[in-house]
Amino acid sequence: MLSLQVYKLAHLLGLFLVFTSLGGLVLHAMNGGDRESNQRRGLVFATHGIGLLLVLVSGFGMLARLGIHGVPGWAAVKLVIWLVIGGLVALPQRVPAASRFVWFLAPALALIAGWLALYKPF
């Protein structure tokens, strides 16, 4: 089993990958780009998916290292938040007008997820 610090680093790397790809995609859509003009769309979606996978695997790894069995309520809410963030990647491509909404929603959701991890309120 990996150390808690390794899981935390992997979790952070996943976060960086998710938000780098999401930010690039949203900015492209806000500047009038569409699906056909995004020549690196595959790279963006792959980066997003790999980031989400790292967040998921390292998150469960941290739970195991902390000796938490099952999925506590705060972790379940975090899973839902990450499902929403995962789905946000499709929105700018389908509804470019929603890009500004995604630009502000994604970091707000990440802040809530971070708060849940730090304070474990339930």
Image: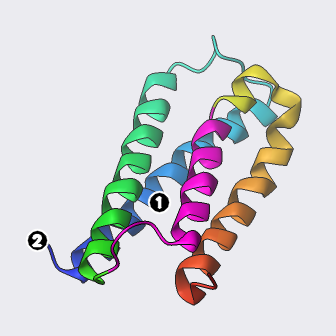
The stretch in magenta equals 68-89
Q: Is residue 23 visible?
A: no
User: Under tag 2, what secondary structure?
Assistant: loop
User: Under tag 1, what secondary structure?
Assistant: helix
Residue at mark 2: 1
- Residue 4 location, x and y as percent? 25, 81
Q: Is residue 60 left or right of residue 2?
A: right
Crowd tier of the residue under label 2, counting other residues whose Cα lies within 10 Å: few below 14, some 14–19, many 20 or above:
few
What predominant SS class does the magenta segment belong to? helix
Q: Is residue 64 left or right of residue 100?
A: left
Kindly identify which numbered label has been placed on residue 16: 1
- Residue 15 location, x and y as percent? 47, 60
- Residue 103 location, x and y as percent? 76, 50
- Magenta-drawn stretch contains 88: yes
The answer to whether marks 1 and 2 mark residues whose Cβ atoms lie closer than 8 Å is no
* Residue drawn at (67%, 72%) of the image: 111
Residue at far top of view:
36
* Residue drawn at (59%, 75%) of the image: 114
Q: In the rendered structure, which amino acid carries the disc numbered 2?
A: Met
Kindly identify which numbered label has been placed on residue 66: none
- Magenta-drawn stretch contains 54: no
Crowd tier of the residue under label 1, counting other residues whose Cα lies within 10 Å: few below 14, some 14–19, many 20 or above:
some
User: Which quarter of the rendering shows the N terminus?
Assistant: bottom left
Q: In the rendered structure, which amino acid carries the disc numbered 1?
A: Phe
